[in-house]
Amino acid sequence: MIEVAVREYAALGEGPTWDPAAGRLVWVDILGSRVHTYEPASGRRTVFATEQHVGAAKPRANGGLVVNLRDGVGVYDAQGAFRWLHREPVPGRRGNDAAVAPDGALWAGTMRYDEAPGGGTLSRVAPDGTVRPVLGDVAVSNGTGWCPDGRRMYYIDSPTRRVDVFDVDPGTHVPVNRRPLAVIEDGAGFPDGLTVDADGCVWVALWDGGALRRYTPSGALDRILPLPVRRPTACAFGGPGLTDLYVTTARTGLDRPHPLSGSLLVVPGAGRGLPQPPFGG
């Protein structure tokens, strides 16, 4: 059964991430320039504003958060002080979804505000701020995740309608051999954020599709979870046992958004997630 974790009016809710050290879920409203946290045990919430549109916020090993902003990647320390880790402003471009790899590096995506093909990127940002471009011909860089043993990486460039899979070299962490895992058919929406569960299956939020889908490691469609909102954006397992599936949603661009559009939803007992590593810096 789908429940409301946080009733909110986020323009573009995104990037749910469970922070086990704090027992809370972290998520963002990209266009609202807000970082939200929610503690399910107590119901406590916090919201703080960023100075730029924020595509993602992920826990850091040393406390605080790493954030994928309009002009690059920065960090907030445990006391809330901000500094840039890598600043690379490009007119008309902003940070979008991001994910922390098993080695503690941040894989940060970008996109143009007009979603022009080839205007976005995917880069690996090391904890020391070293940046390695990975993909340079992206439209809307979105979901990124790794299988349980870290040897496969999943990635979504939303307008392609594909969930792609790469092989990952365990020594260099470089993804190679890109190929489609699954293709979303016309009329079913566009793939947005993703998460990988403990079985190695990939859960995908379908923007304009009003649903989540679960694909097996072979690419077979295993489950469809209908949602009351038209624009789910991303999903992540959380809670003490990583059994509750949290879903961020959006209301931007909708003439008549559902009353829950922009809220944080949760599906208790949906499965079992993988522990997400913190950013190493």
Image (spheres, grey):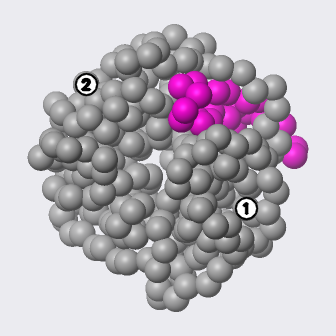
Q: Marks 2/1: CA distance?
A: 35 Å
Q: Residue at x 65, y 80 (%)?
A: 84
Please state the extent of the stretch shown in magenta in the rendering.
149-172
Q: Using the rendered view, name the quadrant where residue 82 is placed.
A: bottom right
Compared to 267, does 79 lie above or below? below
Q: Amino acid at mark 1?
A: Val
Residue assigned mark 1? 125
Q: Amino acid at mark 2?
A: Pro
Q: Nearer the viewer, residue 262 or 43?
A: 262
Compared to 274, does 76 lie above or below? below
Looking at the rendered structure, which numbered label has been put on residue 226? 2
Quarter of the image where the C terminus is located: bottom right
Mark 2 neighbour density, 10 Å: few (under 14) some (14–19) many (20 or more): some
Left or right: residue 158 versus residue 132 is left
Q: Position of residue 247 (x, y in %)?
A: 32, 43
Q: Position of residue 161 (x, y in %)?
A: 53, 25
Left or right: residue 76 versus residue 210 is right
Looking at the rendered structure, which numbered label has been put on residue 83? none
Can residue 147 be seen in the rendering of this structure?
no
Q: Residue at x 60, y 60 (%)?
A: 93
Mark 1 neighbour density, 10 Å: few (under 14) some (14–19) many (20 or more): many
